[in-house]
Amino acid sequence: MKKHLKRALTLALCALMLAPFSFTAFAAEAKRTSCSDDCEFYPTIIVPGLGQSSVCVTDDDGNFVLDKDGNKISAFPAYIQIDKIVKRILPSALATLALQKDVGFSDAFADVIDDCFGINSSDLEAQNTGNVITEKFPYSYEECSEYERSIINSHIPFDIYPTDLPKDHLYYFSYNSFGNHIDLVDELYDYVQLVKAQTGHDKINIVPISQGGGIFAGLLEYHPDVANDFHKVICIVPALNGSRIIGDVFNGRIKFLDADYLYNGFLEELRLLDEYTARLIEILVRILPDEVIMASLEKGVDHLVENVMIRSTSMWSLCPAEDYPGAAEKYLSSPEMADIKAQTDKYYHAQLNARDNVQKLVDMGVQVFNVAEYNFPIINVGDNWNTENGDYIIQLDSTSMGAYSANCGETLPDDYVQKNTHCSNPGHNHISPDRVVDASAGLLPDTTFYFEGQRHDLTQHNDVILKIAMRLIADDDIKDVYSSPEFPQFLSGRNVKNLLELIDTAESLDGAFILPARRRAIDDAVKNAKEIMNDNLATGDRMKESEQALAKALAAVGKAEVEKEKNPALLRRISEYLYDNFGTNGYSEMPAVILKKIGGNITDFFKSIFA
């Protein structure tokens, strides 16, 4: 208690000392660029997505907690301390395993969830209570240290995709994804003014990404005057209407809490594991009774949602507008949650007005562009995971500002005619070549680019998306989706991360002794890879084939490994047999099931004899 009191007094004293300066910092900010307001470039603020900021664990005195290698420890999405977890859960796990019943295991599991995610908890005013510090950059990328640039590039690889925009015109707004949403919006507004003061420009570009789209929506609603500060807005998969995942979780529609689905399909459809691993887990998890597994998951989810998520107004900003009223009634109706509800209600109205506020920008002459992704089912956490098109994390309606589409794996009817909700030009065809998306129904039909089959969490590894963004922030040559044959409206999802690493490995072999035939194979594979990367129209499948060819060529000289796919057929048959014959029962419960079946068969046998 004394330590916490000492810390509180210290922070209060610091606040009093800094108070005279905190509200005048932006007004007094000296100009830090050599250009004038008529510079051909516009300062650009990147507002990153979920978890794309450095939020670090601290001790009670505000000092960074370091790992064994001396690195700061990330608090997103949780602070995982293996030793602490093992100490808490091992005794009950062993007892539960031995007795085949829940001997405190589910409670221990819930406690572990609290311990890990509690670092991101908030109080009843939606203010973070965990020991964390968000590393912020109140200056341009040019002025960032090497360490700070490494943080930024780990999320948005500016070092790989350079832009003509001067580095002293590029800014990165970092924030805590579990933070107070209204505070983050106010901070972004102040940051815009900071950038204007530092660069001497009256207008800036802003690039809201994913969760950053929700902060941007709040900015337009709470600070409408900021519209006068924008030259260009470039939204990249913005969560303007939240994510269906959060809507389902907040409304208790959690798919994997259905035991039948958990034991028969959940892990495979999760798409984070190959089928071999998914089926292996389905078999191994039966080492415990299903009631223990389900009780642990149910308590874990309850603790995560009720102790962390519902007190974070940033998490509420990711709840779709149509899902908000029911979720608010469920979690925010008590008097103690009144403050949080007042804040979330405020954003709910911002969310409802988001598209109208974006349209106001367009009407004012602000250039607004958008990037959306489709044809990837929403991750199967909630009940609605496969009911609409999306990009694994966010539904297409949210990121595209209203585009109409068929569901994943389906196409629009043969006689479908585009809606032209927001396009009045009869010469424009906004239906995707695969006949999945009608972009004319989206708010920005002429300035929204669509990427088929792109996963949301791999957006930063799609080189074409980054190329478009870099072009848009550097110049005004691209006016719409018709401006450049390099960037048509509909493009392919792709992931170049592994391919770039393989190219680097191949080019580092210069001077090494390699048999001529193998050297030629590597050089040809590198040439092919670079040609595909330079082709913005190349599909993700072609990219993958190129990656596999280069990996095979490098593996021949011991510089790469070609991953062999494990055949899941046997494990699939075992898992399906267990489910078909024993449902969700654990191994210790199976003898009783067998005896029951035998008993039933014997009864039926005698009945048939004496019938």
Image (cartoon, helix red, strand yellow):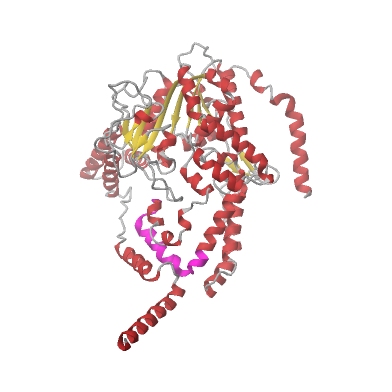
Q: Does 548 sit above or below residue 478?
A: below
Q: Which residue lies furthest to the left in this view?
A: 517
Q: Does 391 sit above or below residue 227?
A: below
| Frontmost residue, 510 versus 192 | 192
- Residue 519, given in percent of the width and then of the height, sits at 24, 42
On the question of residue 174 being in view, the answer is no
Report the number of numbered marks. Answer: 0
| Frontmost residue, 359 versus 141 | 359
- Residue 428, given in percent of the width and then of the height, sits at 29, 23
Q: Quadrant of the C terminus?
A: bottom left
Magenta range is 271-293
- Residue 160, given in percent of the width and then of the height, sits at 41, 32
The image quadrant that residue 423 belongs to is top left
Q: Does the magenta stretch include residue 336?
A: no
- Residue 583, given in percent of the width and then of the height, sits at 40, 68
Q: Main secondary structure of the magenta part?
A: helix
Q: Is residue 292 magenta?
A: yes
The image quadrant that residue 85 belongs to is bottom right
Q: Which residue lies furthest to the bottom in this view?
A: 610
Task: From the viewer's perspective, tell me whether residue 24 is left or right of residue 78.
Answer: right
Task: From the viewer's perspective, tell me whether residue 611 is left or right of residue 193.
Answer: left
* Residue in the picture at 55% in, 45% down: 327
On the question of residue 270 being in view, the answer is yes
* Residue in the picture at 43% in, 42% down: 457
* Residue in the picture at 49% in, 69% down: 289
